[in-house]
Amino acid sequence: MNALHHFAGRALLATAFCMPLILPAAVQAQGKPAARMPDVIYVPTPQGLVEDMLRLADVKKGDVLFDLGSGDGRIAVTAAKKYGVRATGIDIDPERIREANENAKKNGVEKLVQFRQEDLFKADFRNATVITLYLLPELNLKLRPRLWAELKPGTRIVSHQFDMGDWAPDKKLEVNGRVAYFWTIPAKKP
């Protein structure tokens, strides 16, 4: 092999290894954000607890529910099907969004439910009257200032399994080793 072929081969190899590093920057330069990995692994909330969470939040017709980290959409779909509310699920994982849309279609609630592939820390959920979530403790704490700042007084929040640090819940429900916490956004926010 002559020196020119050797150099060309090395240059091609170097380019191939650098492409994954260059591509995200090129995509961002076009105004499209690079995909972000989910903050939590997907673990579905058992259906019985979904229904308990919706009762705990006193969901009723006229509510607007947002499920943050919505997974397969079971909370939003159940709220729409059982209570006739408009519901939006937000999840960063495109596979979960696909499953959620299939779930809505299977249950005949596509007109009441929508699923958005978004970063829940950037998503707009200000018109919610009910927020549901199943995140991790540190994510709940990271989200808490936005909940206080952006949600109207009286908005109800239910978290599966994890609390909000020193923000004491209004109610706590324990069922079959699972926990749900309930808060109401106060008129005077902390």
Image (spheres, helix red, strand yellow):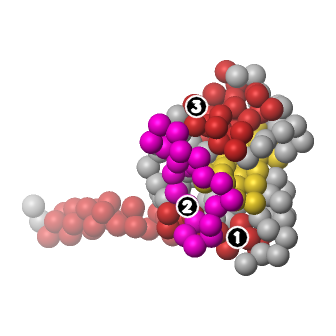
The single residue placed furthest to the left in the displayed view is 1
Q: Position of residue 115 (x, y in %)?
A: 69, 42
Image quadrant for the C terminus? Answer: bottom right
Total numbered badges shown on the rendered structure? 3
Using the numbered discs, state the Cα–Cα distance from disc 1 to disc 2 in whole angstroms.
16 Å
Q: Residue at x 83, y 32 (%)?
A: 84
- Relative side of 7 to 147, left or right: left
Using the numbered discs, state the Cα–Cα distance from disc 1 to disc 3 in whole angstroms.
29 Å
Examine the rendered structure and indicate whether residue 62 appears above or below residue 33: above
Q: Residue at x 53, y 64 (%)?
A: 139
Closer to the chain start, of discs 1 and 2, is: 1
Residue 143 visible: no
Bin the neighbour count of mark 2 within 10 Å (Cα to Cα): few under 14, some 14-19, many 20 and up.
Answer: many
Q: Position of residue 157 (x, y in %)?
A: 70, 55
Examine the rendered structure and indicate whether residue 169 appears above or below residue 161: below
Circle 1 residue: 146
Give the amino acid at mark 3: Gly
